Amino acid sequence: MIRRKLLTWVTILFIIYSCAHNPYKATNKTYKKQLKSYEEFVRKYPLHDSVINSPYFVGTTNFDMRKPNFVIIHHTAQNSCDQTLKTFTLERTKVSAHYVICKDGTVYHMLNDYLRAWQAGISKWGNTTDINSSSIGIELDNNGFEYFTEPQINSLIQLLGRLKRAYNIPAANFIGHGDIAPGRKVDPNWRFPWKQLADSSFGYWYPDTTNIIVPTTFDHLQALRIIGYDIKDTSAAIGSFKRHWLQDTTIGMNESQYKVLYQVSRQY
């Protein structure tokens, strides 16, 4: 009995301590206030048909909530998890993400998955241009010049598994910020283990290319477009592809790299 009471008091004290020492109590209130404003908006303007000259409204029985179809992976380009959390809770920065994963593997969920984070910016993948409206953004604590930690990648893979199951996200739609914004963004940096993710069905990889013969009719720019890249700036698109699939930041492409591009494009 005494032991049970002691455990109860320890639990209560832990909760009180956690709440009292949350440095984001103030911004959490702002978050909840904004959520409430959206709830009030929906109550004020119910989710029904807006056509007013129909004889009556006919509601379909076949629908569900809109849901994310892409996952965009970033590095924070900052020096600590705390710095990034602060950045995403300052209104003047106008930038956010759904998740932040620290070097020790701690995951912070900063925005409900169904809500629109400001993380992709001006970007394009295939025919999709408003990527913020159809994606979940994940930021990895990394300044852009270092390798990603094992606990961090382990937590990422667990999170991606949950997201893929929850929203039925296609394997091809796990991509990087640098993929959707070639020439403007380079994250996650070339050290990111894309193959490790692809081995878990988060993205695609390519088989051995030693004996591959690339057809003479192969168009490398069309291959980039088929994968999803915006080829308006061809050099930038090539650079983004090489960073993702070759961990290479050099300019141009050689014969062995064309083989990789050919193999990757065949999966799309």
Image (tube, grey):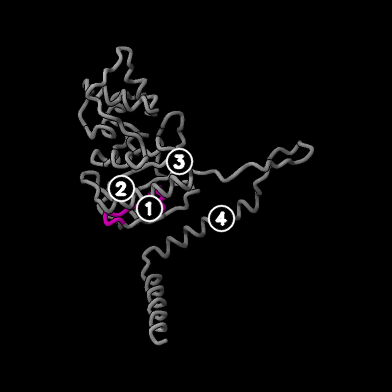
Q: Which residue is mark 2?
A: 76
Please report the residue visible at 47 percent of the width from the left and 49 percent of the height from the top: 113
Q: Are marks 3 and 2 in contact (CB under 8 Å)?
A: no
Name the kind of residue labelled 4 in the image: Ser
| Mark whose residue sits in front, 2 or 1 | 2
In the rendered image, the vertical position of residue 216 relative to residue 75, given as above or below? above
The reply to whether residue 122 is in sight is no
Q: Earlier in the sequence, mark 1 or mark 4?
A: 4
* Residue 88 circle label: 1
Q: Which mark is residue 169?
A: 3
Residue 252, image x, y percentages: 23, 23
The boundaries of the magenta stretch are 88-105
Q: CA distance from mark 3 to mark 2?
A: 23 Å
Q: Secondary structure at mark 2?
A: loop
Distance from label 3 to label 4 (Cα)?
29 Å
Binning the other alpha carbons within 10 Å of mark 4 as few (below 14), some (14 to 19) or many (20 upward) gives few
Circle 4: element type:
helix
* Mark toward the start of the polypeptide (3 vs 4): 4
Identify the amino acid type marked 1. Answer: Phe
Residues at marks 1 and 3, CA–CA distance in whole angstroms: 25 Å
